[in-house]
Amino acid sequence: MDKIELLAPAGSLEKLKTAILFGADAVYCGGLNFGLRAGADNFTLEELREGINYAHNRDKKVYLTMNMIPHNQELAELPQYIAKLKTLDIDALIISDPGVLALVKEKMPEMEIHISTQANNVNWASALFWAEQGAERIILARELNFEEIKEIAEKTEGRVELEVFVHGAMCISYSGRCLLSNYFVGRDANRGDCAQSCRWKYHLVEEQRPGEYFPIEENDQGTFIMNSRDLNLAEEVPQLIEAGLSSLKIEGRMKSVHYAATVVNTYRQIIDQYYADPDNYQADPELLAELRKISHRDYTKGFFYGQPGSEGQRYQSSSYLRTYDFVGVVKERMPENREILVEVRNKIFKGDILEAAVPGRKSFEINVDYIINSDGKKVESAPHPKEKVIIPCGEIMKKGSLLRREKDEVKA
């Protein structure tokens, strides 16, 4: 059977290339207009063209987000934006608004359309409706359990593709349709400018007692009452493949290069291991552990096994768990000297034990016995971001592999 697609976030050109290097079959990214991640770097037309060429030269695909819910003034700008997109070889557009879909179908009738999770697709009839409007794929809402996903797949089989999220941040509101940010700070989440108000710490103020702030607590655990944990369905990948889905999607266009590489590499290996021997597949604990080495919130299975209760939230804090520092990117391997050229991202010290994330394989350790700077001198540390240094490494390393270091407080 055809392998399910692994779809990765690309918040910048560097992240696009990293995701593809580490095994993504396709990436999704935003242009400068009409997407839902105004805080991401996003792509100019020239960057999109370069990214598309990079992907297509490696038989990968690029999907562009146009999933904001536009008001009249934005809609007036859409025809001109579509005209610019016609000069690019985009593989699909991700859309949530019927008006945007109609305009795209009028101006770009051959363009493949994917219906965004923002359209709140939670049943098979809705999926078939969008298929009748010309959509080739439906990105299902994250508020579905597995039995619901499976039923939608059965009743839409052969008529429309289905895509589901398997990893990344969860929204407190229904498939991302939220008014909190707009209400509190005037930033419209449905037009790409969410302030993540659900991650804030809240107190209660009684009308007759202004200035007195009472903590909101659930079971004395804390006050971050709307702070959802991050989704992690790595162990459920076999069930999702067997359900007949077309694509597994990773959230995180605003996350780091290290996040993109690690999450894509992990899911790539899980998918490949399953297809290699479905009958005897067992989850690899070492691979699952990789997902705890990125910056993340506590994990949850979301709605996969049913309505999540209090365990779906983290009440103590909205901060991320960070157990590793991303310290460098491998730019070149020098096999004759058993060394690698590294572009520094965080300070590297002589004596460090680093961990290498290499496409297609499990991570492994490297001992930094020495550091050679750009002047050819041995130094005690490499403190400057973007400087290039040489360190020893006897392992085979692909260009673009990443290096990380476990935080001291975690080791302790």
Image: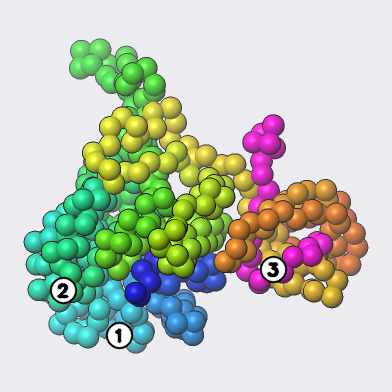
* Residue 180 visible in the picture: no
Q: Residue 302 at x, y = what percent? A: 31, 43
Secondary structure type for disc 2: loop
Disc with the residue nearer the chain's start (2 vs 1): 1
- Secondary structure under tag 3 reads loop
What is the secondary structure assignment of the residue under circle 1?
A: loop
Image depth: mark 3 or mark 1 in front: 3
Q: Nearer the viewer, mark 2 or mark 1?
A: 2
- Does the magenta run of residues contain 405? yes
Q: Is residue 92 above or below residue 389?
A: below
Q: Which residue is mark 3?
A: 397
Q: Position of residue 233 (x, y in %)?
A: 38, 50
Q: Which quarter of the picture shows residue 213?
A: top left
Q: Is disc 2 surrounded by few (<14), some (14 to 19) or many (20+) residues within 10 Å?
A: some
Residue carrying label 2: 159
Q: Is residue 167 above or below residue 397?
A: above
Residue at the spot of label 1 = 86
Looking at the image, which residue is at 69% across and 32% down? 412
Q: Which mark is residue 364?
A: none
Which residue is at 43% across, 35% downward?
318
Amino acid identity at mark 3: Met
Residue located at (91% from left, 63% from top):
377
Q: Along the polypeptide, which appears first: circle 3 or circle 1? A: 1
Image: magenta residue range: 391-412
Q: In front: 197, or 53? A: 53
Q: Is residue 288 left or right of residue 106?
A: right
User: Residue 388: horizontal and vertical position, in percent?
Assistant: 75, 65
